[in-house]
Amino acid sequence: MDFVTLALPQEPASGFAGWAAGLVDAMGAPGAGLAIALENLFPPLPSEVILPLTGFAAGQGVISLASALFWTTLGSVAGAAVLYWIGGLFGRERVHAIWAKLPLVKSSDLERTEQWFVKHGTKAVFLGRMVPIFRSLISVPAGVERMPLPTFLALTTLGSLIWNTVLVMAGYWLGDRWDVVEGYVGFLSKAVLVLLVMAIAACVLVRLRSRNQPRSQHRRTS
């Protein structure tokens, strides 16, 4: 019996889980690393599926637990490094030029964000590795702000190792119930997404009000 059928006995080739299981079945632990690298580049790919599934593979003897942790962490770092490079390629001036063309935003907002990242960037990169969605996005401002690469890689490795270990070990211990992890982490992902949307909506609302206030004051004075 191949690993895909073992991991997904009811629907052996369905969805992300079937794709990830196929990579592990074909490539072993490096396949899990490749899946996680792609998950960092494309956040809709769910680490909450890939990592517990990798832990299940380790529990079944398909791969070793040490190789599961090593390759998934290496994949996390590789994917983050690509996003860091993209941020560095865009650079501060180009990001400011793009920002200036966007509606309802001010250059001062971006400058404050940069100041915040300079002050809290190390915490953001480290802790961000353990927050769904944000774990991918944080690499871009790190590249834009030219965070020292050794520092970025060290923080990314440590944060990713913690996140990956928790989810891989969950799959390892849960056995054929590895898929229940997705429900818990999926809830966290949705909560983060809702908070992000609310923050963006609040920012837009503030900008609209600040634009309307000068107009109303001008009408009163005239």
Image (spheres, rainbow, N blue to C red):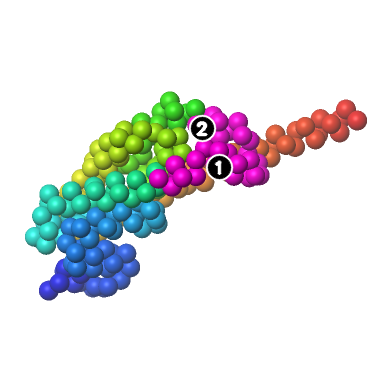
Q: Quadrant of the C terminus?
A: top right
The segment highlighted magenta reads 85-114
Q: Nearer the viewer, residue 208 or 147?
A: 147
Is residue 108 at all visible to an observer of this figure?
yes
The amino acid sitting under disc 1 is Arg
Q: Quadrant of residue 159?
A: top left
Q: Is residue 211 magenta?
A: no
Magenta highlight: main SS: helix
Q: Quadrant of residue 49?
A: bottom left
Q: Nearer the viewer, residue 65 or 10?
A: 65
In the rendered image, the vertical position of residue 191 relative to residue 108, given as above or below: below
Is residue 183 at all visible to an observer of this figure?
no
Q: Residue at 37% across / 49% down in the picture?
A: 82
On residue 94, the disc is 1
On residue 113, the disc is 2
SS type, badge 2: helix
Mark 1–mark 2 Cα distance, whole angstroms, equals: 16 Å
Q: Residues within 10 Å of mark 2 (few under 14, many from 20)?
A: few
Q: Residues within 10 Å of mark 1 (few under 14, many from 20)?
A: few
* Residue 91 x %, y %: 50, 40
Q: Nearer the viewer, residue 202 or 77?
A: 77
On residue 205, the disc is none
How many numbered circles are shown? Answer: 2
The amino acid sitting under disc 2 is Thr
